[in-house]
Amino acid sequence: MSDTIPAVESDAGRTARLLAGFLAVAIVLIADQASKHWILYGLDLPQRGSVAVLPFLNFTMVWNHAVTFGMFGGVGRHGPLVFSTISMIAVLALLAAMWRARKLWIAIAIGAIAGGAVGNVIDRLRYGAVVDFLHAHAFGYSWYVFNVADSAIVCGVIAWAADSLFSRPTP
C-alpha cells in the first residue's frame, strides 16, 4: 500500500481546460457560420450550384434535410425540430464531458464537436436544413458534401477516440 495521497486536480487546471474547450466551441461556431454566410450570400452558391476551387475540391450547394450521410431523411416537416432537439441534448452531454475532461486536447476536441453541432442546429432552425458545400473528389471518388461544422465534429471525434484507444488509464 502506498502512503502517497492521490493528486487533487487544481481549479486552475480545470478552468484552463474549460476555457480552451469553450474557445474551441466559439472558433468552430464562428468559422462555420461565417463560411455558410459567405457561401449563401457572398458567393451565391444556391444560384450557381457548383464552383470548382481546386482540381480535387468544389463548392457544391447541398441542403441537407437529414443527418450525417443523408440518414433519417424521411422524418418530414418536423425533422429540423427533432434533429435540433436531439443535437442540443447531445451538446449538453458533451459539455458535461468537457467538464470532466482531464486533458487539454480532449476538452478542445469536445469543444470542436459541440461547436459543430450547434452550428448545424442553427442552420436547421434558420433554414430548415443544414448548409453543406465542401465537395472533395479525387481519383474517381467523390466524397459526401459537408461543411466546416461537420469537419470539426469528425476531427474532434477522431481525436477523442484516439485518446480512448491509445492512452494509458490514469490511476
Image: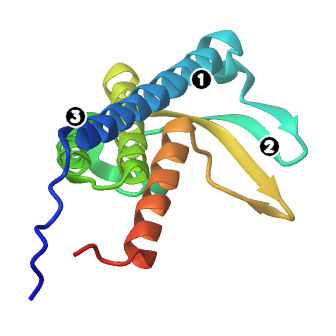
Task: Say which of marks 2 and 3 sits in front.
Answer: 2
Tag on residue 57? Answer: 2
Compared with residue 146, is residue 171 higher up or lower down, i.e. above or below?
below
Which residue does the numbered mark 3 point to in the structure image? 81
Left or right position of 116 against 17: right
Compared with residue 44, is residue 148 higher up or lower down, i.e. above or below?
below
Figure quadrant of residue 87: top left
Q: Amino acid at mark 2?
A: Leu
Quadrant in which the N terminus is drawn: bottom left
Of helix, strand and loop, which one carries label 3? helix
Which residue does the numbered mark 1 point to in the structure image? 35
Of helix, strand and loop, which one carries label 1? helix
- Circle 2 packing at 10 Å, graded few (<14), some (14-19), many (20+), is some
**Rounded to the nearest whole Å, what is the CA distance between mark 1 and mark 3?**
23 Å
**Rounded to the nearest whole Å, what is the CA distance between mark 1 and mark 2?**
15 Å
**Where residue 62 appears, x then y in whole percent?**
58, 37
**Where residue 164 appears, x then y in whole percent?**
37, 71
Point 84% across, 33% down: residue: 53
Q: Nearer the viewer, residue 158 or 141?
A: 158
**Rounded to the nearest whole Å, what is the CA distance between mark 2 and mark 3?**
32 Å
Q: Are marks 2 and 3 in contact (CB under 8 Å)?
A: no
Q: Amino acid at mark 3?
A: Leu
Outermost residue, right side: 55
**Where residue 122 appears, x then y in whole percent?**
35, 25
Quadrant in which the C terminus is drawn: bottom left
Point 46% across, 52% down: residue: 156
- Circle 3 packing at 10 Å, graded few (<14), some (14-19), many (20+), is some
Compared with residue 159, is residue 27 higher up or lower down, i.e. above or below?
above
Left or right position of 40 against 127: right
Q: Amino acid at mark 1?
A: Ser
